[in-house]
Amino acid sequence: MLVETLGARPAARRRPGPVAWLVLPTLLLFAVFFALLMGVMAVVADALLLMAVLAPLLTGVVVRTYAWMTLLSDQGVIDSVLAGLVPFMVLTLTGVIARIDPRLEEAARSLGADDGVILAG
């Protein structure tokens, strides 16, 4: 086969890229949130939320693609929300990170921790 002679791997055997490793935990958090929410809601609200969760499975690929394009475009919902929230997140995190004692990083390094472990806390 031409693809095999060029050394390319079929799409089914490709390794996930860095975006997949960001999307997976996000989706897991959303799934847990919705499952917990559905567990504590009343029956009517639970049925409505279940319909909202199942609706993407009932729509076609074209409709879902258009919805993603609407959400992720330059003037989309996600872009406008993130543009408004990122400055507040940066300001909040800057104040918190500035108060971390630098001796904690030195202690972690002296115990053999690498940068990833120190950053993860």
Image (spheres, rainbow, N blue to C red):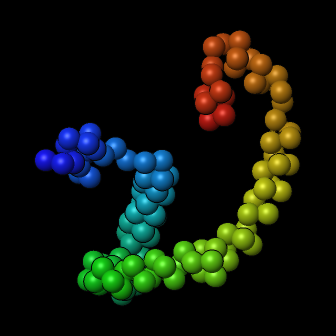
Q: Is residue 18 left or right of residue 75?
A: left
Seen in the picture, residue 17 relative to 23 is either above or below; the reply is: above
The percent position of residue 62, horizontal first and vertical second, equals 33, 83
Instruction: Look at 28% across and 83% down and name the residue there.
Output: 60
Instruction: Look at 46% across and 64% down and name the residue there.
Output: 30
The percent position of residue 14, horizontal first and vertical second, equals 30, 46
Asked which quadrant contains residue 35, the reply is: bottom left
The percent position of residue 41, horizontal first and vertical second, equals 42, 76
Asked which quadrant contains residue 32, the reply is: bottom left
Inspect this view and state whether residue 17 appears. Answer: yes
Q: Residue furthest left?
A: 1
Q: Nearer the viewer, residue 33 or 61?
A: 61
Inspect this view and state whether residue 77 appears. Answer: no
Q: Nearer the viewer, residue 119 or 16?
A: 16
Count up the numbered dots.
0
Q: Nearer the viewer, residue 89 or 16?
A: 16
**Screen quadrant of the C terminus:** top right
Q: Is residue 105 left or right of residue 72?
A: right
The percent position of residue 39, horizontal first and vertical second, equals 37, 69
Instruction: Look at 40% across and 63% down and name the residue there.
Output: 31
Seen in the picture, residue 12 relative to 37 is either above or below; the reply is: above
Instruction: Look at 42% across and 83% down and name the residue there.
Output: 66
